[in-house]
Amino acid sequence: MTTLARKLRLVDYFVLGFGVMVGTAWLVVMDDILQRGGPLGAILGFTGGAIMLLPIGYVYSQLVKAIPDAAGEAAYVAKFFSPRISFLAGWMMLLCYFLTCPFEALAAGRISGYLFPSFNTMELYRLGGQPVYLPHVLLGLTITVLLTWLNCRGIQASARLAKATTFTFLTLVLIFAAAGAKHGSTANLHPLFSHSPLLSVLLVWQVVPWLIAGFESVGKSVEEASPDFPKTNFSVAIMLTIFSGLVFFWIVIWSVAYVAPWQTLKSNEQFPTAVAFEQALHAHWIVTLIMASAFVALLQAFNANMVASSRLFFAMGRRNLLDSRIARIHPVTQTPSTAVIAVGIASAITMLLGEAGLVPILEVGAAASAVGWMSACASYYCMKPAFRGRVAAIFGLLVTSMMIFVKVVPMVPGHFSKYEWMALAIWLAVGFLLRASGRHENTSAKHQSEISNVACETQPSES
């Protein structure tokens, strides 16, 4: 039986995890983060959110070592709960990874259109009042096809791209942060909080799990670790991803608030971060640099999320939670090629929904990650770990419950609108349809096999 290629090392797991975590959202939502909490409120909110995720990271580090299965949450849950719950946990987690792919493909057009206005021509249609342009679609489709092809070539090709894009992106971020430090002022940081200190921190904390989710994706590539890879390094990769994501947002929040009065950031502007730097430096080159870093970031995020989503998709097929044909491994490249191609095709189709269609689904993705983390914590608690492990699992269950609570309870600011509920219903419906179809195909294949065996047994012997 062909198995997945075992090539990944610690740096590969780090760049893939960081890639899942950091895409282009930091560029788009920085004004919202600062309006929620102010500079210090935002930094404290991210710090508190990251600290609260550490016990969940610990849970995942133990689960990855105990159950080294690319199915991740679906595999963990399957040890203690029914196949239906196992499917639900995996399917909800798949949403988090998969949706980033079309979102980043769409972001490529927006970034290019900001630098080159000629890209914002040849409108095809409108969804939710937002135009969808032909050049945006063509660019997004080109990136989707190229990354799908690259991922089909093998995990080493994906990891090489992840390393190149991650370290290039971090270098560019340090360059524009240093440029901003020379032109900013501490006066721009005041007031430090947008509301009362506690409310400011809480409002930012609410969005932190969505922005630094991705540490758990390490487990989706667990079967592709190098043969000499120490199991303890899975824990290192997970914790390193969380802390690096936190430091990254510290730098970006401080840099943006330092170069311009954060209250002046306008939510109606496409990229308020770039605008703030341009006004501070009175130069357009800084905009080009920031947009270039964002473009590298979207390639990094698209690639890493394609790896995570295709592995989870593949492993769910292998467990017969979906059509088992999804679990095909290419005999030469040792990649789950069918799953990779399926993710690529689905990304291309979903991208056509445009920004208006994807944003509600992304909101659901934030809650879906909480559902996946909760299922992992519940499974780990059922494993009856030592006291420290039980405390981490219980704490994780409490944190994820709060994350889900703030999204589904109507009186809480930031709760689901009717469009988010519709997106959730559609995703669940698609999942159960695929599951029903897969079970039918698997049952039919098994039935055909039984018929063939019976036919062979009833044939007269030639001897």
Image (spheres, grey):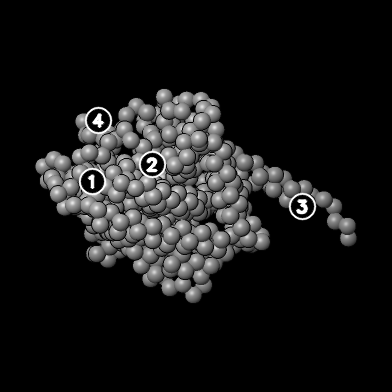
Which residue matches tag 1? 260
Residue at x-position 48% and y-position 61%: 164
Tag nearer the camera, 3 or 2: 2
Which residue matches tag 4? 410
Task: Give the side of residue 85 with respect to residue 315, left or right.
Answer: left
Residue 106 at x, y percent in the picture: 47, 39
The answer to which of 340 and 284 lies nearer the viewer is: 284
Residue lying at the far right of the rendered structure: 463
Residue at x-position 43% and y-position 73%: 230
Which residue matches tag 3? 457
Which residue matches tag 2? 365
Residue at x-position 54% and y-position 29%: 122
Disc 4 residue type? Answer: Pro
Compute the Cα span from label 2 to label 1.
32 Å
Secondary structure state at the residue bearing disc 4: loop
Q: Is residue 414 above or below residue 27?
A: above
Do the residues under discs 2 and 1 have CB atoms within 8 angstroms?
A: no
Compute the Cα span from label 3 to label 2.
51 Å
Residue 189 at x, y percent in the picture: 17, 49
